[in-house]
Image (tube, grey):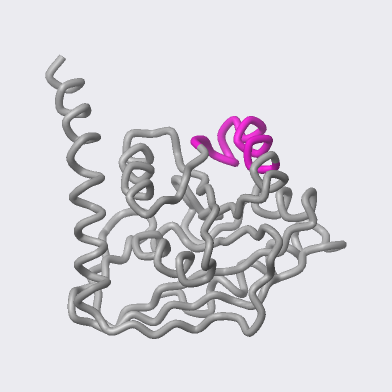
Amino acid sequence: MLKKIFRKLSLLMLPFVGALLIRFIYLTSRKRFHLPLVIPNESVIFAFWHADLLMQAYVYLRFRSHPKAKVLISEHFDGKIIAGVIRFFKIGTIHGSTTRGGAKVLIQGLKALSEGYDIGITPDGPKGPRYSVSDGVIIMAQKRHAKVVVFHCRPTRYWQLSSWDRFVVPKPFCTLDFYASEPIDLEGLEMEDARSVIKENLMKYAL
């Protein structure tokens, strides 16, 4: 009973606190955005490492002047907290994992792409291994002929947690370099070739 009460209170409070922390870091830091020369009008899949998740909403909100996105989020407790945080930035969620019972979440992702949503995904989430690329991002991109855009946030100063992903928390009053890659076309590539292309781009600014 106490555990249920604690979880309910956490789901009420932690998303609000998390959103405040993200905004505080952003507002107290210097920002530099490095965006593609041409932003595609059609839906894209934006990918980023799980460790780099915290500040990605700001890359997307600069990438799209009229945001319309859903992010694939784990159904676990920590995923629900992340989903609550994301809602403060007017970004929707799809709950599930592309590696655990993935058919359902892939179908929802494909449907959202057809409806004009951009889809956000952490290819190594929700539980790793770190810096691995799951099949889901490739399947969705190729089935919907969608380009992949890789996002990064590279802070000049940060804390790095001892979690499996070595989660990065930028320190306030640092400089945040936000990167969005040129759209990556995976059409006609075999699965392992597509995986290598995505990983190569994701590793460019990995900490």
Q: Quadrant of residue 123?
A: bottom right
The reply, left or right, for residue 50 in relation to residue 5 is: right
User: Magenta segment, which residues?
Assistant: 95-110
Q: Position of residue 200 (x, y in %)?
A: 62, 74
Reply yes or no: does residue 17 show up in magenta. Answer: no
Q: Quadrant where the C terminus lies? A: bottom left
Outermost residue to the right: 188
Q: Quadrant of the N terminus?
A: top left
**Is 127 placed above or below 42 here?**
above
x then y, percent, for residue 202: 55, 70
- The outermost residue toward the front is 66
3 or 118, which lies in front? 118
Q: Residue furthest left?
A: 2
In the rendered structure, the answer to whether residue 78 lies left or right of residue 39 reads: left
Residue drawn at 52 percent across, 71 percent down: 63
Which of the pair 129/87 is nearer the observer? 87
Relative to 140, residue 59 above or below: below
* Residue at 15% in and 28% down: 6
Give how far across and how far down residue 172 sits, in percent.
18, 74
Residue drawn 53% across and 61% down? 66
Residue 53: image location, x then y, percent: 40, 60
In this rendering, would 146 be left or right of 35? right
Number of marks: 0
Residue at 49% of width from left, 78% of height from top? 179
Snapshot quadrant of residue 118 = bottom right
Quadrant hosting residue 99: top right
